Amino acid sequence: MENFELSCPIQKSNFDRVLLAHGSGGTLSHNLVKDIFLPYFGNNYLNVLHDGAILNNSNKKLAFTTDSYVVNPLFFPGGNIGDLAINGTVNDLAMCGALPKYISCGFIIEEGFLINNLIEIIKNMKIAADKAGVKIVTGDTKVVENGKGDGIFINTSGIGFIDEGINISANNCKPGDVILINGFIAEHGMAIMSVRNGFEFESPIISDTAALNGLVADMLNVSKNIHVLRDPTRGGIASTLNELAESSNVGILIDENTIPISDTVKAACEILGFDPLYVANEGKLIAFLAPEEAEKVLGVMKTHPLGIHSRIIGEVVCENQGMVIMKTEIGSSRIVDMLTGEQLPRIC
Amino acid sequence: MCLAVPGKIISVDNDKPDIIMSKVSFSGIIKSVCLDLTPEARVGDYVLVHVGFALNTIDEKEAKETLKMFHEMEQLADSVTPELS
Amino acid sequence: MKYVDEYRNKDLIESLILKIKSISSKNYSIMEICGGQTHTILKYSLQELLPKEINLIHGPGCPVCVTPIELIDKAISLSQRPDVIFTSYGDMLRVPGSSDDLLNCKARGAEVRMVYSPLDAVKIARENKEKKVVFFAVGFETTAPANARAIIEAEKLNLDNFSIISSHVLVPPAIEALLSSKNTNIDAFLAAGHVCTVMGYSQYENISEKYKIPIIVTGFEPVDILTGIYMAVKQLEDGRNIVENQYSRAVRRDGNLNAINLINSVFEISDRNWRGIGIITKSGLKMKEKYKRFDAEIIFDFPDLVVTQSNECIAGEILQGFKKPTDCPSFKNICNPEYPMGAPMVSPEGACSAYYLYKKRRN
């Protein structure tokens, strides 16, 4: 557990579970914020406990994003829903080329949720926010009846600022662009599977959940010619590449031999019948950039802890617009298409 | 038929009289596997695992023989100009 | 992974392709029985690497695809009972019944749980004594021993709340049915390696002799499939027709006797309806009398069951290799993985789903 400073002393809670009254706006709601949230999240914006946060303006372009987190199980090797809630939203801002600054958190908690579990989640959110250099400036809590929620749902929205000269957008893939990834794929999805009821396995796989804004800042420092940044979360790199091929109306060629994947993740996918290209990541980014930029960007990525295993995995072409084609490990070619729904474990 | 993956037996649980369970490692991923279909299998053996059961032990000698045959074929093929599409 | 990576070796594959090219003097149609082999062929685009003389036909070896629609409907009916926990391998969840599928039922609140092993379903029954736990026991001979062992485990534990819907089919009768059809144009078979791991391959010797057709017991990696094809073509060129074992690292002629005995202790052979194909005699397994108390089709009533099948779906012709998915007028427009008309579009072993994933061209 990393060390951090609590912003005020923790009061011992009189309750070990969340009650409906904790979401009703009365004394218990107030105590939940004061006794549980503020000790971890408190800062000069949040401590005011006003209806909204009043933030300083900037003359830079603003990036604004929102995401909701409904993962099951809530706790998994490498983290919990709290990590995803902060890192996911920070990453969405970073993929716009923005410096993430402010986060809001909305919690929908199921009646009966263990207070200790809530504290674990909040602790991880605090650590993740500090690591990413963002402040949680406003929030909300609601409680729903037992049976009407999956333990806890979290929504986070984020604001970031984009420096002059940075122009990153999903439409910007250009033929000739080189495609980079910062490390091993499919770790988050398989970490989740390893603790999923009915499919458990013992493994060293942990979620790769991480805030990528530091890595992105390093990349943007050496090159202003990065065309696209995306984090391939649900649906894996296959889905993200397909979305980009379609939105930019280009063809994408990738090489299976260059896609970084660990032996354990590969084995876990084999056992359950999963294709790793479609398995979720939470600490990965895909970058499209002009080929003459590739060497220096790759170089700086490899010096960052989240980019040690960075690789070039493909390129953008004019042919087969809207499609992703992969050269397989045996030298043949096949289409990598979008999946319709989520992958299910199979025995056939 | 169906998905069966080779793994190495790393331990056998002989405590339960009615069912032989084991731990099988697949490149570091460890799953519980029932050895009732392959009661002769031992720690260190490779087994083919399907729906949590070992279907058969992998015959290492046979595997080596077939790979040896492949490599001989490879050497023969090297003398032909490759024309793969 | 050991015993996997070596069989995906690029250099070996290149030399196998060259060898096949060098010996193929005529056109041959070779059928791979198992959907898992179809999956490999399409995932690695093996047909495109092979010389044009070799035409690969995809066979009916997809137990998910051939499970009768009536059994899917019964599974759906059971899953909607409040006193039932319905357990299943993941493969079955998207297969369409007459008007619904298990995944949709789950979304609407039915207690449907995916399991990896049939023993997990027994465990759920043990831990939920107040509920009835039903397991969708689907499979060819590969999966039958595990499903049988689950029944025996339930018996040992004296469970009165565990039962299965049994959908087991056997490969050799299906091959015979195909070969005795006048529409068939198959020169050689790649037999399903994992079925043979359990059953051995002595059953195929009669078929090979009777129909004068080479049968190669073949594995599932690209090197296995190409070696199997090479061995089949070699026999055809030499005018031979015997059973050969390419998958010798995992298959012995007599199979796994423990597994065979287990199957025979719980199940007996019966006629079976193959979805899209029809009834094939002695091609399935049903529960023996002494285990009837674990048979969900006997324990439960299914009032108001109305079984209907799509007229446009040509799954049967595809499963028998008469047509390819791309020959189907519904392929990729009306019929797709999100809105499937038949099982092969959603089964992980289905030819239609493999074609859709690996070969579909966008409009």
Image (cartoon, coloured by chain):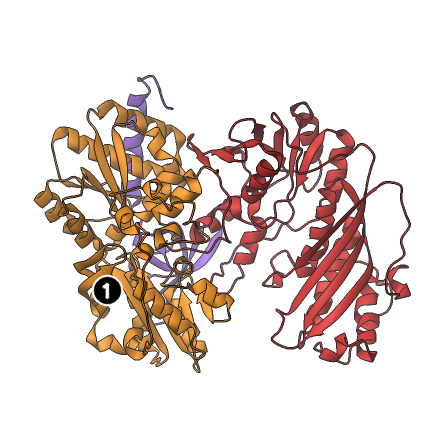
Chain colours: A red, B purple, C orange
Viewed as shown, does residue A272 lie left or right of A305?
A: left
Q: Position of residue C172 (x, y in %)?
A: 18, 52
Q: Which residue is mark 1?
A: C263
- On screen, residue B35 versus residue A273, left or right, reads left
Q: Quick check: can you spot residue B15?
A: no
Q: Is residue C9 above or below residue A98?
A: above
For disc 1, the neighbor class at 10 Å (few under 14, some 14 to 19, many from 20) is many
- Going by the picture, which residue comes out furthest to the left? C210
| SS for dot 1 | helix
Q: Residue at 55% across / 32% down in the picture?
A: A252
Q: Quadrant of residue A165?
A: top right
- Looking at numbered disc 1 in the image, what kind of residue is underneath it? Ile
* In-front residue for pair B35/C286: C286
- Quadrant of residue C57 within the rendered picture: top left
Relative vertical location of residue A124 with respect to residue A25 in this rendering, above or below: above
Q: Position of residue A290 (x, y in %)?
A: 67, 26
Query: Where is residue C230, by image quadrant?
Result: top left
Residue depicted at x 37% and y 39%: C42
Q: Which chain hosts label 1? A: C
Q: For this rendering, which residue is in front, A219 or C299? A: C299
- Work out whether residue B17 can be spotted: yes
